Image (cartoon, rainbow, N blue to C red):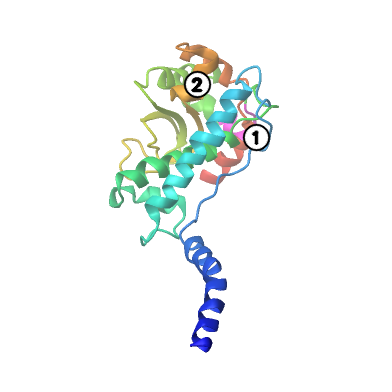
Amino acid sequence: MKFILQKLKIWSNFTPLLILIIKSKYMSFTLPDLTYGFNGLEPHIDARTMEIHHDLHHNGYTNNLNKALEGTDAANSSIEDILANISNHSGAVRNNGGGYYNHCMFWEVMSPNGGGEPTGALAEDITAKFGSFEAFKTEFSAAAATRFGSGWAWLIVDATGNLAVTSTANQDNPVMDIAEVKGTPILCVDVWEHAYYLKYQNRRPEYLTNFFNVINWTEVSKRFEAAK
């Protein structure tokens, strides 16, 4: 009996580690840190909104995605692979997987040193596709402003290698196989109210105007080159 108790005590010491190892197999996604402070995008996007948006909303999507994937064949898949086959997954994976991916990109395409206009090949393609940068801004802003309810607006590179502006509802995105307009996103803007309501209330167009003051065109250009 003493021997058995000793064995049980040894195994009990390892139990928390074993649980952690088992769980870690299915906890594929983590909340990324911001590369700038919560106040880094002020005055265009306020610090409190950034804190709530990142630490509560994005963190919630991350945790809920991991829970939805736990024990499934997709638990160790990349987020891109999951989204590209989203029609095979549950609504929880669709909503939270989209929320995870969309926000990861959103933080990266903004910068305290953002704004202005793109340069190089991206600028040339924008002019070729839309006629001018100002015409692109108008079309992109309209797509975001007229997205009813919650959702996102996107600049994508489509399957033919051309730029296109589109929008999606809720946490859907153009990577998903159920998207009406598919492609590789290179720029996005969040038009859920939690992205802007503390500062702008119902003035979504004003939020969108100021969003252009924080766009990280260097990051967008990198995504553009990778997608071509």
Residue shown at 44% from the left, 38% from the top: 99
> Does the magenta-highlighted stretch encompass residue 24?
no
Whether residue 159 is visible, yes or no, is no
Where does the image place residue 5, in percent across and percent down from the top left?
A: 51, 82
Q: Report the magenta residues as a range.
A: 118-124
- The residue under label 2 is 136
| Closer to viewer: mark 1 or mark 2 | 1
Q: Residues within 10 Å of mark 1 (few under 14, many from 20)?
A: some
Amino acid type at circle 2 is Phe
- The residue under label 1 is 218
The alpha-carbon separation of the residues under discs 1 and 2 comes to 17 Å
Total tally of numbered discs in the picture: 2
Q: Is residue 93 above or below residue 127?
A: below
Contact, CB < 8 Å: mark 1 with mark 2?
no
Q: Residue furthest front?
A: 1
Q: Earlier in the sequence, mark 1 or mark 2?
A: 2
Where does the image place residue 113, in percent across and percent down from the top left?
A: 70, 27
Amino acid type at circle 1 is Thr
Query: Predominant secondary structure in magenta?
Result: helix
| In the foreground, 228 or 20 | 20
Question: Helix or strand or loop: what does disc 1 sit on?
Answer: helix
